[in-house]
Amino acid sequence: MSKDSSSSSGPARRTSYRRCASSLSDGMGGAPRPVCKFGTNCFRRNPEHTGPTGEAHPADPDYLDACEKAGVEPEFISIRKLFVWCDRNYSGRARREDLIRVWPVLQRLGQDIGALDDAMWETLDDDGNGHINFSEFAEFTTKHKLGLPLGLDDLLGQTNDVCELVCGVYGCQCHGFAARKRRCKYGGECYQKKEDHLLGFCHPGDV
């Protein structure tokens, strides 16, 4: 996702997600919901168990909040849930220290994922701005074959503009896909001034 589209749609999307999660978390007068220990293997479908005053399950908007408050390791069912578990402030950005939270999960589910050292972080932080967004995270997890869906379906209905749902993941068939810039390997020494290069790559000093 480009910086412009990310900055314009991100706050509204995060606010909507947080509002939905908070409303369910407060279903019992502010007390956190208990977490169903069976997760996606739960066979109970009665409203008393799955409703706002019942137990939280992996697909519920407040599931990660419930796990956080209960001190329970969540069951991840999508790439987006993994990212939100890092991004507990719903900022749309995750720092290197935030990723430590899910790194063992990534290594367990993915292929050829080593330690989160400087070289690995540079691979993740493709544009070199000191944090990663969902686009960068999703592209990395797709490359390393985590085998989880992106998990963007639940964003439908949280925005009035379908174009805001563009994920920016390379090769994605999202409506109105717009690729984000990649970091030029030559950095400040780059001599290319062609428009297609400047549109596709970021350089030190870019606004």
Image (cartoon, rainbow, N blue to C red):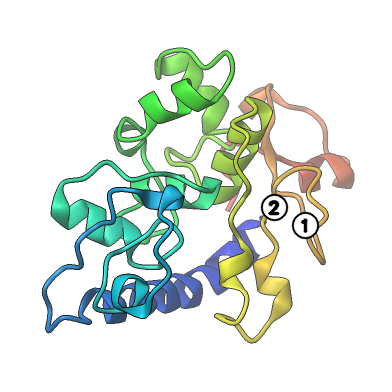
Q: Is residue 98 above or below residue 83?
A: above
Residue placed most toward the observer, 80 or 97 = 80
- Amino acid type indicated by mark 2: Gly
Q: Provide the residue designation for mark 2.
A: 168
- The answer to whether residue 121 is visible is no
Residue placed most toward the observer, 147 or 178 = 147
- Residue 118 badge: none
| Image-quadrant location for residue 186 | top right
- The answer to whether residue 32 is visible is yes
Is 27 positioned to the left or the right of 15 in the image?
A: left
Residue placed most toward the observer, 2 or 92 = 92
Kindly identify the residue that appears in the image at 29 percent across and 82 percent down. 23
Residue placed most toward the observer, 53 or 92 = 53
Kindly identify the residue that appears in the image at 27 percent across and 65 percent down. 55
Q: Earlier in the sequence, mark 2 or mark 1?
A: 2
Kindly identify the residue that appears in the image at 44 percent across and 48 percent down. 41
The secondary structure type at the circle numbered 1 is: loop
Which quarter of the figure is the N terminus placed in? Answer: bottom right
Q: Position of residue 173 (x, y in %)?
A: 83, 54
Kindly identify the residue that appears in the image at 70 percent across and 63 percent down. 166
Q: Position of residue 203 (x, y in %)?
A: 64, 37
- Contact (CB < 8 A) between labels 2 and 1? yes
- Amino acid type indicated by mark 1: Ala
Question: Would you call the spot at circle 2 few (<14 residues within 10 Å), some (14-19), or many (20 or more)?
Answer: many
Q: Position of residue 8 (x, y in %)?
A: 56, 73
Measure the C-alpha gap from mark 2 to mark 1.
6 Å
Q: Is residue 107 above or below residue 81?
A: above
The secondary structure type at the circle numbered 2 is: loop
- Residue 178 badge: 1
Is 135 positioned to the left or the right of 201 in the image?
A: left
Is 52 positioned to the left or the right of 179 in the image?
A: left
Q: Is residue 71 above or below residue 60?
A: above
